Amino acid sequence: MLFSSITFLFYFLPILLIVYFIVPSKFKNLVLLVFSLIFYAYGEPIYVLILLLSCLVNFVAGLLIEKFPSKGKLILVLTIVYNVGQLVYFKYTDFFIANLNNIFNLSVPLLRIVMPIGISFFTFQTLSYVIDVYRKDVEASHNFLNFATYVSLFPQLVAGPIVRYKTVEEELKKREITWSGVAKGLFRFAIGLGKKVLIANLAGELVTNLTGLANGSVVASILTAVAFTLQIYFDFSGYSDMAIGLGMVFGFHFKKNFNYPFTATSITDFWRRWHMSLSSFFRDYVYIPLGGSRVSWIKWLRNILIVWFLTGFWHGAAWNFIVWGLFFAVLLILEKKVYGKYLDKCGVFRYIYTIFFVVISFVIFQANSLGDAFYNLKSIFGFNGLPFINQETIYYLRSYGVLLIVAILGSTPLLKNLVNKIKEKQGTGLKVMNIVQPALCLVLLVVVTAYLIDSSFNPFLYFRF
Amino acid sequence: MKNSKDKILTLSFIGFLCTFFVINLCVKDQDVSVSERRKLQQFPNVTLSTITDGSAKDEFEDYTVDQFAFRDFFRRIKANINYKVFGMLDNNGVFIKDDYIFKTDYPTKTKSVLDFTKKIQSYASSFSENNHVYYAIIPDKNYYLNTDLFLNLDYDYMYDTVTSSFDKAGYDYIELRDVLKLEDYYKTDTHWKQENLAGVVDRIGSVMNLGASSDYQAVEGGDFYGVYYGQAALNLKPDKITYLTNEIINDATVSYLEDTKQNQVYIPENLTSLDSYNVYLDGPSSLITITNPHNTSGKELIVYRDSFGSSLTPLLIESYSKITVLDTRYITSSIYQNYLEFTNQDVLFLYSTMTLNNSDILKN
């Protein structure tokens, strides 16, 4: 089920909200678990069993690690093998078969395994849990209901953010639900919904139109890359806002997942701001255990390459995702060892440098294959013999110009800073915000409903991960 | 104050969701959308197999969107925001210029145009030597868009391709581009207005050596909400539909392949149907025969046409004893040949540029 769907907004959510707020506190986790399983089963009726099995295995593993500390490492390794094995089986089997076929000239048939939605996210959540229990960073959960609620909690189940158990450990046991918390959550949800439906979907339409052009141009290729970069940002950050907002409505406080990444001053800075829950996962569970940067130069290089290979591969079972990850590895290495120290002195060029390579990276990310990625990059730099601009490009530039400007401005903290300035003006400013915020929330809801009713383009890009 | 803001926000948000949840449950499901001229998704058949194969879910998603209360109102909001806030040039491919609604048909499909010429020549392969073949290409109203702002077909390519192909085949060309203008088309529909076709009829008559036509009496059929009206989802004025008649048209009888009963050229009951344009020859039909008892010359015409032909053909009946109207979107040549013998009739191919660019809709 998509958050940005009529089914979710006008059937699932109102029923859940009513039931959730009516039942006593001790039943709230049960309500969330049942509705989360319905949410998941709606799209994956059979794979809900995989989700439940994953909950059970990791719950038992946590208990065993706690009960038999001397065998903790073995239990941890077995649990990691189970979790990673499950992910590899569903997500990467056909990738490996296809590559083995290519390398050894075999003809092993592909298994065409359908990947359970959100498996990359909930697998990483359960991995973080068992590793944290082994490290004694958290106590093992002794309540299966609470643990299963944590793993399957629908706001972050299918597209993140990757919530660590320790972030919500206390709130799973006891949480306060206040008017303020619910209102903040609903407002954040509405903002996320608007980002997704009004910007990401329209940017996606533009990408579809431009990639389907009968006659391409250099400007169209650049526009496609920019539009896709904006689409994926508003799509994913919008989803994260909705997830964080819904979490707040139900009394949970998830950490933020994006922090205006397009205002980053370097690629290193970009990855501190983009999909923060994933980059911190790889930092805490792969990079640092490998020794991080406190090792020899060559081992550090190895660590960086492993982490970014895995980051790319996590995003999809295809070579362009691996190259996308390694592309960032190269830039991060260069920033650390070659020109990073000069970047700080480059003023506005730092922003241009960062956004340039981010956009280029998403050309690789968006492509269906490495060949396509190479072709698209050549088009952007004018090496495919395309005209610089043509009538079709001008049409789409004019038609989507306002959207692009709104999206670019919306990806900066300008609006947030403006709102904060108004709020700082105690009295009038606060009064204005007290009126504007509920009105804006309702207007967004109406407009989003209008777009959902008359829309044909509504995919969530991160659902495939 | 802050607490009351939080309460207002929370209650209005949840209230909005719950209100529409209840309304959607209570309001009776609709079978069709009049404005969009399409059937609406009904509640899915829920069985174990439709659940496991995902079809029940997919249909339910469509159902919730299609049956949402005040659907047209919400579609209007979206269209207005697309046009007026985002400044988009089109909404779902539909755009407005000078109160006319257009739909983007782009790009020019060269293969489709070539296939069109092949299909027409394939139809013509069963003609006799005594059939005299004419053809006209009807420019769709986007042809008369007087701006480069919107994406448009390469009309020169289309006309040149078809005329060079058909000239070689020996068909006589009837040029229509210079006898039409934007005002001759409905504002809310794709079609031309029958009452504005005098120039077209004269041009066809001069090329096909038909006599001058009699006067017509214009009958007003009321408001016409064309096919683009609902797609535009804006508060626009409907067109007025008119049909031209006279004694000859009134006395002509029409028979359909699918129906044994004799009808009239115009079906006024259709003025209140989903598509008022169906007043002309009862709308889409595979094979129609129009018989004119006032013309005893025995002269016959066979018209191969798309929907534009419905309103034009009645204006040609005066010159013929019988007109056979074929719509090869609905009938194959192997079937219609069972009902039709090609002898010495005039044959007119009358297709719009929209059909040229989407010629896969024509059967072989």
Image (cartoon, rainbow, N blue to C red):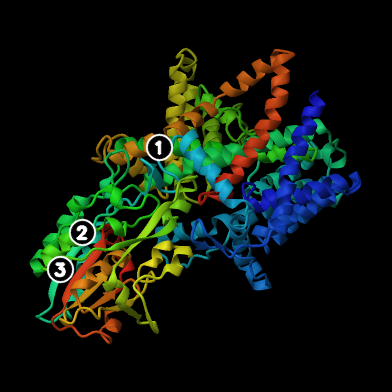
Residue B96's image quarter? top left
Badge 3: chain ID: B
**Disc marking residue A335:** none
**Mark 3 touches mark 2? (CB < 8 Å):** no
Q: Is residue B49 above or below residue A239?
A: below
Q: Is residue A277 visible?
A: no
* Disc number lying in front (1 or 3): 3
Dot 2: what SS?
Answer: helix
Can residue B246 be seen here? yes
- Same chain for labels 1 and 3? Say yes or no: no
For label 1, count other residues whose C-alpha is less than 10 Å away and answer few (under 14), some (14-19) or many (20+).
many
Question: Measured from the top left, where is residue A427 in percent x and y?
Answer: 74, 14
Please state the horizontal and vertical placement of residue B350, each as a whole percent of the image.
23, 65
Per the image, the residue denoted by label 2 is: B200
Q: Which residue is mark 1?
A: A399
Q: Nearer the viewer, residue A444 or A316?
A: A444
Q: Is residue B216 left or right of residue A208?
A: left
In-front residue for pair A419/A87: A419
Name the residue that disc number 3 marks: B134
Circle 2: residue type: Val
* Residue at position x 11%, y 64% in the image: B207
Of residue B193 and residue A445, the one placed in the foreground of this image is B193
